[in-house]
Amino acid sequence: MVNGSAPGPAKGFLRSHAKAVVSALVSGLVACLSSLVTALQGEQSGFDTITDGQWVTAVLAFLVGLGITGPVTSRTPNRPPAGGNP
């Protein structure tokens, strides 16, 4: 392997799990932001009005989004390419 052309363990992991990492981050952010949007609704709005419990709920929603979507997406096999070459 010339000039480091062999993929390292980190590069191989990212190549095979990039879809799972992106989907986990996106779904975690959507869950967190939807929780915060719900907390911001009402007459008095602003980040100062969000209680500690609502912040905890938003963080837990983010973590649940990460924990569920990432592994499920990682375990779902990719479709073979249209040309038949792997």
Image (tube, grey):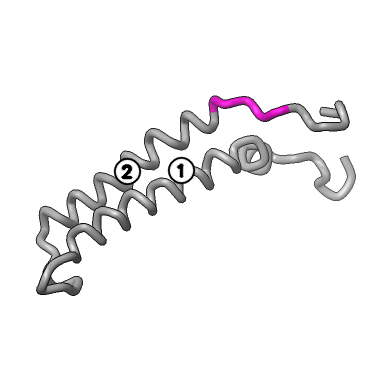
Number of marks in the image? 2
Q: Secondary structure at mark 1?
A: helix
Tell me where residue 69 sits by quadrant: top left
Sequence order check: which comes first, mark 1 or mark 2? 1
In this view of the protein, which residue sits in the foreground, 17 or 78?
78
Mark 1: few, some, or many residues within 10 Å (few <14, many ≥20)? many
Q: Which x, y percent locates residue 56?
A: 18, 51
Specify whether 57 is left or right of 77.
left
Specify whether 15 is left or right of 80.
left
Q: Is residue 77 magenta?
A: yes
Residues in magenta? 75-79
Tell me where residue 68 sits by quadrant: top left
Q: Residue at 80% of width from left, 40% of height from top?
A: 6
Q: Residue at 18% of width from left, 74% of height from top?
A: 46
Q: Is residue 14 magenta?
A: no
Query: In the image, is residue 51 above or below residue 84?
Result: below
Q: Which x, y percent locates residue 33?
A: 32, 57
Q: Secondary structure at mark 2?
A: helix
Q: Residue at 70% of width from left, 40% of height from top?
A: 8
Q: CA distance from mark 1 to mark 2?
A: 9 Å
The residue under label 2 is which amino acid type? Leu
Q: Residue at 87% of width from left, 31% of height from top?
A: 83
Whether label 1 touches label 2, CB < 8 Å: no
Tell me where residue 17 sits by quadrant: top right
Query: In the image, is residue 46 above or below residue 13?
Result: below
The residue under label 1 is which amino acid type? Ala
Q: Which of the labelled discs sits on residue 24, or is there none?
A: 1
Q: Which x, y percent locates residue 36?
A: 24, 59
In this view of the protein, which residue sits in the foreground, 51 or 3?
51
- The residue that label 2 is drawn on is 63
Query: In the image, is residue 67 above or below residue 42?
Result: above
In this view of the protein, which residue sits in the foreground, 14 or 33?
33
